[in-house]
Structure formats: structure tokens, C-alpha cells
Image: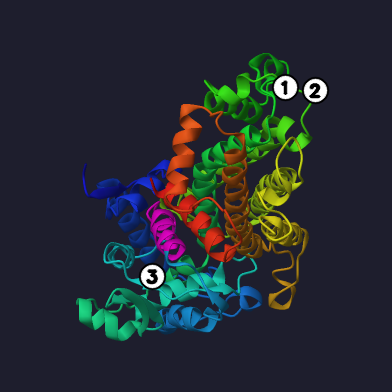
Amino acid sequence: MSSKYTISSTLHLKDVALILNNQLHLELSPESRLAIENCRIYLDKKLDGNDKAFYGINTGFGSLCNTRISDTDLSKLQENLLLSHACGTGDFVPHEIVKLMLLLKIQSLAAGHSAVQVETVEMLMAFFNKNLLPVVYEQGSLGASGDLAPLAHLSLPLIGHGEFWVEEAGTRIRKPAAEVLKEVGLKPITLKSKEGLALINGTQFMSAYGSWLVLKSQSLFGLISKTAALSLEAFDGRPEPFEEALHRIRPHAGQLETARQMRELLAGSALQSREKVHVQDPYAFRCIPQVHGASFDTIAYAASVIEREISSVTDNPNVFPEDDRILSGGNFHGQPLALVLDFLAIALAELGSISERRTYQLIAGLRGLPAFLTANPGLNSGFMIPQYTAASIVSQNKQYCTPASADSIVSSNGQEDHVSMGANAATKCLKVYFNLEKIIAIELMNAAQAIEFRRPFTSSAALEAFLAAYRKQVTRLEDDRYLHADIQGSVQFIQNQLLQ
């Protein structure tokens, strides 16, 4: 396989995964390079001797849009824009998401409607290819005039300001961008008219989070099905709720797919073929296809919106050389992403909610399982408290599901009077995702313990292999021990499985 990826007009989520997983280097296609060059040439000619005001190109920004800027100050205007808008605070954006921001910004600029220099795009590609990741902060974007603050931090190193994360002695540390550029033989860019605005307008902060979340959620879904199937086996659950005939008459795609996965995972199980005493299972088991499936469909919908976004041009104004037009609009507004990221957070939180209920059923002393899954209850508390932990995390996720997109605060003296708050939707959705990993890890820990009480009966070959791999990381509990380490080991197992 080639070690390079060529940026062209369209970027798919599968391309994003390919680039990141294989550490591919970026290069511009000839068509993209030509589009960037032609757009820049057009703007330079348009401004030459033209007294007309073009927003953000020869005017101030936001409510200062009517303040005309001298032609001699246009480069300074763009530099000042980056410096003044780099007002991020809070936690650092995770490195892998910063790298995604670089990729998505390059993709958007390469469409040839942003009037940047080719040299600017090439510098961003050099950052990506050399794994020089700008230091970006989580807080500061309203998700409307583009992700202004985080994208300003992303772009500062282009002009020799800001900081990079660099790897030294096996760890990442922060270093001034000016120092790093000298070390790697790169010179700061002198921005031309419009470029600063092109760099900080856009939805690449929100869409980088969204892309990462969708890809991770899609991968995690199969592990959630395996964990739920193992819990069903441990609870002595019935197979009928997963039969295809049931789901053909309510054919939601996610429901059909989840039921199919469960049938496949349970095929050949001796536990499933045992005669059942109980007539029905609780909803947390019986309704796995319906509940998991709805989240599956939500993830798929989020993927469709985000995939469309990452191939879009989202800065302002946009330049159309072929039509001899410069149009100021609102493609930077994050409402499509804000809504879908709130929706995705709810879908992920629900997967955690039903998982915790299965954990509770397993420790409740039902269906021949000992209370708290310990052979000697009383002296041992067994798995009593991991369920508390899962419940507290589920409750926290519910709080994170308050929609960010339902809020708006006026900014820029009323010029920017409705904002999406999509950046907040993105950062809290990431918290929901990481919480979900922990909740599933706790369910898996309980399911693995519970199924030991069903021996000598065995599950399917697929689930027994899954259990055997898990037992290499987390051993069976005989007597009480330090369970924090087991939970951490279970989370690590989940995360390692996602990398395979």
C-alpha cells in the first residue's frame, strides 16, 4: 500500500480511518493545487485597484465589518486576526483530534474557494506529515463563526506563534512554535489578504471530534454486542427475542443488524440449547435489538452528516473565480453538527444505560447466580460496588446529554446573534463516549464472572474465544481484591480490542 494519501475534492470517513491508522502522508492532487492557485490569483486581481469593501478581506471582522482596512495593512490584519482570536482555555484537545483538525482544514482549503496561498496549505501538510501538532484548547468556540478560538490556536504556528506538541524521549511536550519551525527547517508564512479568516472560519474543530467519535463508536458497537451476548448467556437468557422473523416485521436497519449479530454470536451455544424455566427476560436482555439498534441507526445518521461536512467548504466569504463572485454567507455555522452531536451523545448514553441494567441483573442473585457474583457472600462483597460505579457514570452521561444546541448567546455586538454551541456538543459527546467504554468494561467484568457459575455448560465458540482473550487481562474473582485494577484492566482490554 502507498504511504501517501492524495487530497482531492472528496473525503470519506473510511479515508480518515485509513490515513490515521496507517500514518499516511498527505499530498495535493494536481487538480486541488490548480484550484487553490487559481482562486488566489483571482482574489489578488480582484483587489488590485478596487475600492470595493469585501468582508474580512479588506474590512474588520464581526461587528467591525464596516471598518475599511488600508491595502498596505492587509497582511497585518490577517496576522492580528490569528493572534487576537487565540483565546482558548480549558483542557488540551487530544492529540489525535488535533491531527484530524489539520487534515480537515487542509481538505476544506484544497477545494479552491478560500483564496489561500498554496504555500499555506503545504505548510499545514508539513505539520501533519511531520506529526507536529499545534497546542489547541477545548474551550472557546461558539460553533458559529467557525470554530474561531481553537482554529486560531491550530493556525498560529504558521506565522511562528503558538506552541507545538513534539515528541522527546518517548513523551509529548509543549515547545514554542518558532523554535520547532527552526529545528525542522520551516519558515513562518506571511499571510496574504483573506488567509487568516480562511484559517479560523470553519467547522474543523467540531467535525474532527465528530469524525473521531463516529469511527470509534462504529468500532465499539461490535464489542458491545459481544458483551451483551455474554451477559445474556450468563443470565441464562432466551434466544427467541433475536429470531429474524420478529425483526422482519419491524425492519429498522439497526435493529435487524443487532439481532443478526446476536444470533451469530450465540450460534452453537450449549447454554442456549438448555431448557429455560422462565418465560421472558427483562427488557435489558429481551430488547437488545431494539435499544442497541436505535443507537446503531443514530451513529449511522451522524456519520452521514459528518461525512458530508468534512468534504464541504465552511469558511467565509467564499470565492468563486469561475463566476467572478465573492459571496459572504454562513457556511461556518455549526448547527448541522451541533444537533447531530447532541443526538449522538444521547445514543451513546443509552447504550451505557441499558448495559448498567444488565450488570445489575447479573449481581441481583437471580436465576441461580449468587448475590454479587461471589461464592462466599458476606465475608466478600464481590461485585457489589462496580455496579455503583457504573450507575454513577450512567448518571453523569445523562447530565452530559442536556443539549448544547438548545442554547445560544449573542456575541460580537449583536452581529453574531445566533450561535450553535456545537463545540460544547462535541466536547461533551467525547466525555460520553469515554464513559461508555468504562460502563461496557464493567458489564464485561460482571458477565465474565457470572458465566463461570454456569459451568460445565459452555457458550458459543465465538464467545468462549472472546472470554478466553479477556481472561488473559482480567482473571476470575475468587475472594475480594483491589477491583479498581480489574476495572482498569477491563477498560484496557476494550481499548486494545478496538485497535485490532
Question: Residue at the spot x=59%, y=56% of the render?
Answer: 438
Q: Are marks 3 and 2 in contact (CB under 8 Å)?
A: no
Question: Residue at the spot x=56%, y=23% of the render?
Answer: 270
Q: To which residue does mark 2 refer? A: 279
Secondary structure state at the residue bearing disc 1:
loop
Which quarter shows the N terminus? Answer: top left
Q: To which residue does mark 3 refer? A: 48
Secondary structure state at the residue bearing disc 3:
loop
Could you classify mark 3 by the number of other residues whose Cα lies within 10 Å: few (under 14), some (14-19), or many (20 or more)? few
Instruction: Using the numbered discs, state the Cα–Cα distance from disc 1 to disc 3 in whole angstroms.
Output: 83 Å
Q: To which residue does mark 1 refer? A: 276
* Residue 473 x, y percent position in the rendering: 44, 53
In the image: residue 473, left or right of residue 306:
left
Instruction: Using the numbered discs, state the Cα–Cα distance from disc 3 to disc 2 in whole angstroms.
Output: 81 Å
Instruction: Using the numbered discs, state the Cα–Cα distance from disc 2 to disc 1 in whole angstroms.
Output: 7 Å
- Residue type highlighted by circle 1: Lys
Residue 361 in the image: above or below residue 41: above
* Residue 232 x, y percent position in the rendering: 65, 34
Question: Residue at the spot x=35%, y=50% of the render?
Answer: 21
Q: Are marks 2 and 1 in contact (CB under 8 Å)?
A: yes
- Which comes sooner in the sequence, label 1 or label 3? 3
Question: Residue at the spot x=23%, y=83% of the render?
Answer: 182
- Residue type highlighted by circle 2: Val
- Closest to the camera, between mark 3 and mark 2, is 2
